[in-house]
Amino acid sequence: GKINRGGLVEIPMGMSLREVIFGIGGGIRNGRAFKAVQMGGPSGGCIPGSALDTHIDYQELSATGAIMGSGGMVVMDETTCMVNMARFFLDFTAKESCGKCVHCRIGTKRMLEILNRIVEGRGREGDIELLEELCYAIKDGALCGLGQTAPNPVLTTIRYFREEYEVHIREQKCPAKECRALITYTINGELCRSCGLCAKKCPAGAINGAKALPYEIDEALCIKCGQCVSSCRFDAVMAE
């Protein structure tokens, strides 16, 4: 994840997440703020910064909604969208379902459809509650450990980052500016130096301008790839 020193380490049971992430792992890359850590593999839960002092043992991790699982950790910073992260992990478990029990086979697909709608800006009121209802139904009805733990990423992100779901649904915005469908790119005319580099890097030809005049982005042509942001040397291109 977004950590300075990733890799495989062996630690004694009982170390805190803070000791592992900021001690052994060296903290978050590029000096960004820690946001969450996915603990236990794809079926694990996302643990927020407020629980960084949680000790790595079965009881304390279980209390957060995560699991020991494979012992894997994926570290996230403030540029990570928790709704999209839940969708990413659920996509994996939905594909891994053997299909034997209805709750897991169909329930994970229905949850994935809802999460896809939300990150695409088509979320509806009641989606969060429906996701929670499906999560508990799958946990109770699934026959094996895959289905019983598959809802963990969704349940923990709703538990700790519910406001992100609400902003996606009600305002059709992504606070982390990660969900492409919910991002609008604009150029600040006061900061733009009319160098034309963003236009050269744009694969869709969506940026136009002239010498000594600020460049502009045609939203109808923009494919929201973010090349304009990464290429601008004057911080003139903004994602909103």
Image (cartoon, rainbow, N blue to C red):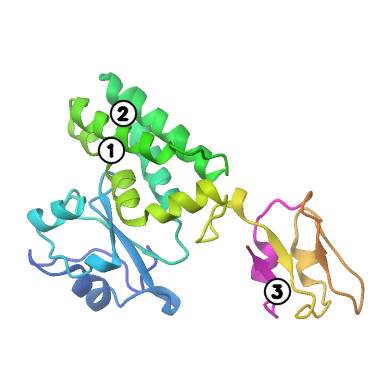
User: Pointer 3: what residue?
Assistant: 232
Disc 2 crowd rating (10 Å Cα; few below 14, some 14-19, many 20+) is: some
Highlighted range, magenta: 222-239
Q: Amino acid at mark 3?
A: Cys
User: Pointer 2: what residue?
Assistant: 97
Q: Secondary structure at mark 3?
A: loop
Disc 3 crowd rating (10 Å Cα; few below 14, some 14-19, many 20+) is: many
In front of the other: 10 or 192: 192
User: Pointer 1: what residue?
Assistant: 150
Quarter of the picture holding the C terminus: bottom right
Look at the picture and state if 60 lies above or below 148.
below
Quarter of the picture holding the N terminus: bottom left
| Residue in view at x 92 percent, y 71 percent | 210
Is residue 227 part of the magenta span, yes or no? Answer: yes
| Residue in view at x 34 percent, y 51 percent | 157
Picture coordinates of residue 177 (x, y %)? 55, 60
Q: CA distance from mark 3 to mark 2?
A: 44 Å
Q: Amino acid at mark 2?
A: Ser
The answer to which quarter of the image holds residue 27 is: bottom left
Q: Is residue 36 left or right of residue 87?
A: left
User: Disc 1, disc 2: CB below 8 Å?
Assistant: yes
Q: Amino acid at mark 1?
A: Ala
Q: CA distance from mark 1 to mark 3?
A: 41 Å
| Residue in view at x 80 percent, y 75 percent | 189
